[in-house]
Image (spheres, grey):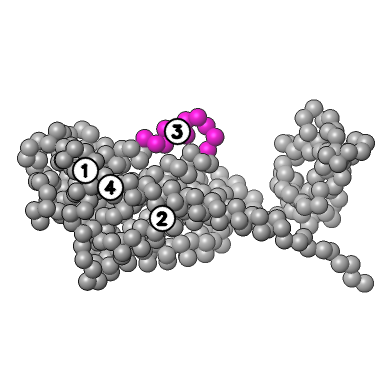
């Protein structure tokens, strides 16, 4: 009996109860998980509000769950272990995980492919809930199996596209950028102003190049880090983000297949535009940090420049954060895509027209995903509710 009471005391904080309606005092039809300390089913100050359909207001009566009801409604016994990881154990596990990530990045390189990033983040979730049962940790593999497969297909497909005999476009983005900026591409203007004329890769590193390279490298991490945080915090919100993130990547893949286009540094090497240098790696040169693809080494497509998914992902993150957050500070998220776009143009990775296309694709994905979710919500609201049929 003492063991049963101990379990009940540990579960009462998250029990399932039928909450009286704060308007009419009737029992709610759908049980929901509440915390007794924060549960205020009768509105503010305990006053019963008028029922929307009229009639007299009834004073609600609070009921306590019976022994049998509490036993049925209580979560499984291992939920305490899942929810309550001791702070010393969590701190120790996170320190070990952080040291391993730093050692891996210093010796092999910072991972920039979906598989390595997901494995690293999975180990981070294990360290955070190190005392949780293993079936909870294996749930990560179950939930992420399909997204990981899709992202791996996307990563490989970018390299396969280069094997197709499709005409590469060289001059269109140059002409468009020159038309928008008075006869000179922004890449040439920025490199001449900030790097020198000529701009050489072996020149001393500027302080802002360290910032630009850091921002550029976050592209390989930010989307999946956000996804794993949402997975750990709110699975429904995780699905909302993953629809947009995967939709953006595969939308870009389709455009890569239909319209392969060379970036500015490659066009300069082939003589289609003035001399510009690919400066992406120079920002971290003095720090001794090298980006390395540790699992899918060598998979890539140099002519997958239209649209810019570096810009598209940064804009998608900013749009998603502004949409879902309520703090006035959420508008500061726009600094991230702004820095990313400047870095991409300065490093000769993308034209401005690529950035515009990437941003347009991100906005289109947000709009289409939201429209699909609203349509699904209307369908669920219009579907008839199940009817309980008494048997016997």
* Distance between the alpha carbons at the discs numbered 3 and 4: 24 Å
Task: Point out residue 134 in the picture as x, y percentages from the top left corner.
Answer: 54, 60
| Residue appearing at x 82%, y 30% in the figure | 46
Residue 329 is one of the magenta-drawn residues: yes
Please indicate, yes or no, whether residue 108 appears anywhere in the rendered image.
no
Residue 193 shows in the view: yes
Q: Are marks 3 and 2 in contact (CB under 8 Å)?
A: no
Q: Which mark is residue 331?
A: 3
Q: Quadrant of the N terminus?
A: bottom right
For marks 3 and 1 on the same chain, the one whose residue lies earlier in the sequence: 1
Q: Earlier in the sequence, mark 4 or mark 2?
A: 2
What residue does disc 1 label?
179
User: To which residue does mark 4 refer?
Assistant: 353
Q: Is mark 2 on a helix, strand or loop?
A: helix
Residue 291: % across, % down: 24, 51
Q: How far apart are marks 1 and 4 (CA)?
A: 11 Å
């Amino acid at each position: 009996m003492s063991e049963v009471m101990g379990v009940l005391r540990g579960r009462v904080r998250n029990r399932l109860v039928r909450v009286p309606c704060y308007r009419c005092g009737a029992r709610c039809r759908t049980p929901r998980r509440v915390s007794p300390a924060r549960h205020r089913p009768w509105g503010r100050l305990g006053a019963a509000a008028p029922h929307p359909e009229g009639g007299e207001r009834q004073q609600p009566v609070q009921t306590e769950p019976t022994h049998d009801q509490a036993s049925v409604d209580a979560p499984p016994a291992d939920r305490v272990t899942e929810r309550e990881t001791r702070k010393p154990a969590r701190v120790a596990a996170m320190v070990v995980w952080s040291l391993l990530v730093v050692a891996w990045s210093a010796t092999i390189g910072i991972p920039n492919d979906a598989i390595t990033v997901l494995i690293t983040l999975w180990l981070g979730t294990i360290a955070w809930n190190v005392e949780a049962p293993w079936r909870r940790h294996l749930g990560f593999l179950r939930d992420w199996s399909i997204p990981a497969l899709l992202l791996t297909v996307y990563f490989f497909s970018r390299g396969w596209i280069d094997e197709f005999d499709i005409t590469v476009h060289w001059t269109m983005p140059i002409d468009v950028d020159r038309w928008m900026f008075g006869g000179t591409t922004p890449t040439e203007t920025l490199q001449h102003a900030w790097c020198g004329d000529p701009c050489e890769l072996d020149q001393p590193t500027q302080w802002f190049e360290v910032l630009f390279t850091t921002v550029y490298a976050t592209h390989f991490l930010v989307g999946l880090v956000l996804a794993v945080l949402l997975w750990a915090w709110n699975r429904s919100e995780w699905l909302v983000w993953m629809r947009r993130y995967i939709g953006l990547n595969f939308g870009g893949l389709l455009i890569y297949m239909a319209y392969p286009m060379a970036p500015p540094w490659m066009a300069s090497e082939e003589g289609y535009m003035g001399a510009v240098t690919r400066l992406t790696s120079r920002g971290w040169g003095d720090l001794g940090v090298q980006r390395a693809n540790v699992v899918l080494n060598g998979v890539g497509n140099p002519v997958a420049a239209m649209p810019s998914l570096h810009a598209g992902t940064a804009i998608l993150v900013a749009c998603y954060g502004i949409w879902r957050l309520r703090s006035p500070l959420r508008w500061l998220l726009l600094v991230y895509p702004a820095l990313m776009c400047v870095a991409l143009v300065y490093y000769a990775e993308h034209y401005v027209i690529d950035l515009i296309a990437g941003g347009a694709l991100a906005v289109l994905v947000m709009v289409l995903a939201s429209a699909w979710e609203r349509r699904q919500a209307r369908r669920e609201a219009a579907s008839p509710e199940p009817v309980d049929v008494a048997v016997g």
